[in-house]
Amino acid sequence: MKTMYGRQFATMVSMVLLSFLMLGASFATLSYQYTIREKKDTLERNARVIAGFTSESIQATAVGGGLVWKTDAFQSYLASVAKVSDTHVMVATPDGQILYATAGEGELTGLRYQQIPRDMAAELPSAPYVGMSDLGGLYGEARYLVGLPITDGAAGHLQGLVLVSCAASNISGMWQDLSAILLVTALAVILIAAIISSVTSMRQSQPIKEIAAAARQFGLGELDVRVDVGPRRDEVGELAEAFNAMADSLSKSEQRRTEFVANVSHELKTPMTTIAGFADGILDGTIPPEQERHYLQIISSETRRLSRLVRSMLDLSRLQSDERAAQQQFDISETLVRTLVTLEDKVNAKTLEVDLQLPEEPVPVWGDQDAITQVCYNLLDNAIKFSREGGTLGASVSVKGPKATITISNQGDTIPAEEQSLVFDRFHKTDHSRSADRDGVGLGLYIVKTILNSHKETITCASGDGVTKFVFTLTRA
């Protein structure tokens, strides 16, 4: 069976059937042995009772004179025992000649004066006989037989033999009845188990079929498909939740991809349109010769902007492909200071006051030093770019436990609360008109986030009352 429903149903039925087969075989063996043992004990018990009664009757008859096996009381007693126990009861002389035999409904005259096997008669005085025997052909088929000696209780003198037998069919009939009960019960349980297994298997496989159908729709581009399995909290429910979570993630990724393509197109189209327009204007004479230098400077600026965009995208591609240097130990305070020095001209251009707070001792950390330098550069450059003239640029390093915390802050416009969680997205700009930040390409903070994610570190943004802070962590060496 190729379906999960079929395999699970077949497995369940097979297990139940195998269990009952094993249980039935064990039960059959044990019940047969128990039946044999119980019948043997019953026959032995009846034989002892008859032997005791016969011995007492012989003594009583000897006092009064006469033959015990011919008395009505004796024959009636043996007939009653034989009828109640559904057996044949026989009394024989010490040498094995049957004197009286009854099956409960009168005397078995065909057995009177017959001789039981002499070897059996010879062994009975010393050891009881228990087993299957046809009494040397006296019976048409072997019967289960118990033979005991009749002895004088006081002197131990052998007075005769008593034999009690039952048909083998009596034992097998009892065992067959028990087996029939087991078989009917087994069939009923298997039927119930099959019905329950069928319903359960179908209930378990149906949501998986729905998930498979949803996955196929997903493959065709229908990203809004979701799986509803109701209030289930089992493994299938967890699978459905995981599928829906994956679907949500892929849907968001597709949305980000669409936005990324649109943003890249916009970022490339704007400078290229500017470059092409001004270049054509210079070539066809629309722009006067005295203004050519001004427009060539604009073309040069847009070209450099395109170069920065391409370089940032190459850096982003390298980071996302995990092509980074092995981690090493370095002083984050020294790295932060060196990065700040490279931005001295931009700081002076805005007449910013630098508030640098560093520990007296070096703060060694683990990481890719070049990548962390890029993180510091992007954050400081971003802080300078959006600082108000004459404001304060803050940079600090602090130590807490196994982590070093680096904070970059500036004074400028407050980032709206709804924008703060989006500042690390690709091509995201708080200025949606893209006019205020002409030099930026919208990838700086995304690159920062990608680098720190690859280091398994965190970065947060907080903005309020004109102060914006970016805080990230590094693991101390």
Image (tube, rainbow, N blue to C red):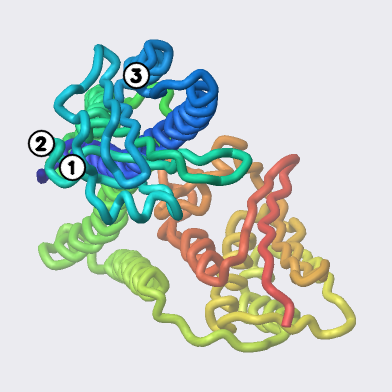
Q: Label 1 belongs to which residue?
A: 134
| Camera sees residue 146 | yes
Q: CA distance from mark 2 to mark 1?
A: 7 Å
Q: In the picture, residue 348 is in which quadrant? A: bottom right
Q: In the shown orientation, is residue 139 left or right of residue 268?
A: left
User: Looking at the image, which residue is at 30% across and 21% down?
Assistant: 86
Q: Mark 3 vs mark 2: which is more N-terminal?
A: 3
Give the amino acid type for the residue marked by disc 2 in the picture.
Answer: Gly
User: Looking at the image, which residue is at 47% across and 44% down?
Assistant: 158
* 34 or 447, nearer to the observer: 34
Give the amino acid type for the residue marked by disc 1 in the picture.
Answer: Asp
* 397 or 68, nearer to the observer: 68
Using a 10 Å C-alpha cutoff, classify the residue at mark 2 as few (fewer than 14 neighbours), some (14 to 19) or many (20 or more). few
Q: Label 2 belongs to which residue?
A: 140
Q: CA distance from mark 3 to mark 2?
A: 27 Å
Q: Secondary structure at mark 3?
A: helix
The answer to whether mark 2 and mark 1 are in CB contact below 8 A is yes
Query: Depth-wise, is mark 1 or mark 3 nearer the camera?
Result: 3
For residue 215, the mark is none
For residue 70, the mark is 3
User: Looking at the image, which residue is at 51% across and 87% down?
Assistant: 326
Name the spot of residue 37 as percent of width and height, x first.
Answer: 40, 40
Q: Secondary structure at mark 1?
A: loop
